[in-house]
Image (tube, rainbow, N blue to C red):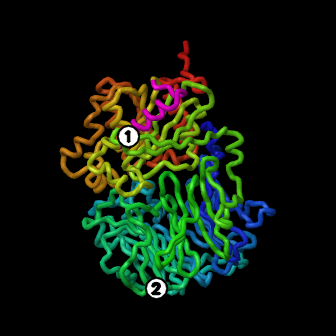
Amino acid sequence: MKPEHLPLLNSVSPPAVHPDGSRAVVSVTRPEFDADAYTGQLWNVPLDQEKLPRRITRGVRDTAPAFSPDGLVLAFLRSDGASSKAQLCVVEADGGEPQVITERLLGVESFSWSPDSHRIVFSSREPEAGRYGSVEDVAADAEEPRLISTLQYRLNGVGYTRDRPRQLFLLDVPELGGEPAAPLPESVQLTRFTTDTASGTFSADGSAVYFAAAPSDGDDVLATSIYRVSATGGEPAEVDLPAAPPQSVLDVRESRDGQWLFFIARDLGGSGRDFVARNAVLCCVPAGGGRPVPLTDPEMMDVAAPGSRIELRGPDRVLVLNNAQGTVELLELGATGDHSLLVHGDKAVTGAAWSGGSLFVSFADPSTHGDLAVLDDGQLRILTDFSAALRTQADLVVPQELTFDAPDGYPVHGWLVRPAGKGPHPVLLNIHGGPFSQFTVALFDEAQVYVAAGYAVLMCNPRGSAGYGRDHGLAIRGRFGTDDMRDVLAFLDGALARFPTLDAGRLGIMGGSYGGYLTAWTIAHHHRFKAAIVERGFLDPVSFEGSADIGWYFGGEYLGDSAEALAAQSPLGHVARVRTPTLVIHSEDDLRCPLEQGQRYYTALKRQGTEARLLIFPGEDHELSRSGRPRHRRQRFEHILRWWARYLPTASNPAEVPQG
């Protein structure tokens, strides 16, 4: 794969299944260089393979499809371009002209149908008067000053949040086929919290809406509670969960029979901030109240895979996704605690939904960036092939799964992506962010671009990663740069010893976010790498506390609160030992690891005479490499390949010849 192949990366949304089970609708989105934006439409995917999938909308970017429970209407979000905000649309399920039914200044973020198919609850940010264009002719730089009194007031990818909290609104869905000039339906605001509310979902009888939010008087804790508000309006009431510890609630749904309340939450310990390596747990409580019962193992299972949400199946059963050793599994659980493992193995499930006896599953694997399947007799039957052009044009390489022992005998699990030919190939050691996340078996554009340029790529999930149990994730608490560094180097050395096609004398190291941290830490302690790339790094825990959106709690919980602990684990504090040429990549609008982290690290390298470059992307945040503007993503790859060509040239990525 080459940088110019980015538009072939089709991402597939979780499926919306028609109530009769005969078909599903998914959103298929992709980067587009010409528009410098992400475009995509909705696709209808029949259960009957004699009927081909087909595109059913023609919007610039149509996402988040959902059928009404009666199957007559399909709702979705539509954005008209890179700068426009998504609005809620409805269209007849059998086809027709979509009708926009909201006109929210800051757009609609999510929505959910009522059981009677006549109402929708949606989430949208509500701006203070005079901000974000709510008053004509008041530009952003002319707004009133912000008086901050809380620790949590910004969010990466959003910006300031206290003056535009996410609220819930309810509207009646108009009859389709009405007059084109008919006014938009009026929405009723259900919540008025000073903090963000999570997506709302209706109770089984449609009389109420459940959601999660932090209490307005609890601005500086991570804990959120479950609330219930009448669908006719009124004051939201907190759901009583006796003996429940402080927790962060990620999703909540009432069972179809109305007897149970399912929710996904992370225990936050007595302090309300103890988030380190906390696996997300599916819990269940009687809808009328009671003590919550965990349905998944908090030590070994983590049901908060990217995009994970509770999906209902049958009267009292749900579907959830589980991070598991470099894969994402699909689980089915009942209110009484019984469970089934439905999809596992060489897959990363990205969504699932059931209706009419059909269970549709969206997924990625080593050869697809996203596709849709149906579960038949315990086996996935593939219904789409949205990565066909990518496989044809990009010569994808399937990663090889490996496990090597660390010096203390601990197994380190990961993958090698190797170019064709006998080599020897230069090696790039790639380290993931988090740290409580994981590399998976899903097709990874980064690895494919580098292997096409002639590099062998090593990726592993060292101690600190998610998916291998809580003890694995907790191992580096207060000990950044110890077992995690030993694990990634042991994985590197194990691969070098096993595969003679890897060139032990030509090594590069790279990583983003926490991966940027561990890259910077490693090159301060080992000088075996020809060059390094430190991207969006967590590099100085002291300044991080006052500048990052999560800085007020992240460093203290992971590294410790004392000045000595922070200094002992700070890459900036050890930068004087770095001799490795380093490219520092950062984004101007990164609030997770702010730009000053990269700037200060780069400056320290330059002042001590270490070869360094600083690459800054305007208008991008912490998600540049995953969802940044398509042209910036391509340019990022081009700069990275030029850096490696300078220090680790290959036949496919040769060093530039000086001109003149």
Which residue shows up at 35% across the image and 82% down it?
240
Which residue shows up at 37% across the image and 66% down it?
266
User: What is the crowding at mark 2: few (fewer than 14 residues within 10 Å), some, or many (at least 20)?
Assistant: some
Q: From the viewer's perspective, is 650 left or right of 553?
A: right
Most common SS among magenta residues: helix
Q: Which mark is residue 230?
A: 2
Q: Quadrant of the C terminus?
A: top right
Badge 1 or badge 2: first in the primary sequence = 2
Q: Is residue 284 above or below residue 248?
A: below
Q: Secondary structure at mark 1?
A: loop
Which residue shows up at 43% across the image and 62% down it?
301
| Residue marked by disc 1 | 406
Q: Residue 17: within the magenta? A: no
Q: Quadrant of the N terminus?
A: top right
Asked whether 150 or 581 is in front, the reply is: 581
In this rendering, does residue 407 appear at all? yes
Instruction: Pinpoint residue 348: horizontal percent, then vertical percent.
Output: 56, 55
Residue range in magenta is 484-504
- In three-dimensional space, the C-alpha distance between marks 1 and 2, rounded to whole angstroms, equals 55 Å
Q: Where on the picture, by quarter, is residue 454?
A: top right
Amino acid type shown at disc 1: Ala
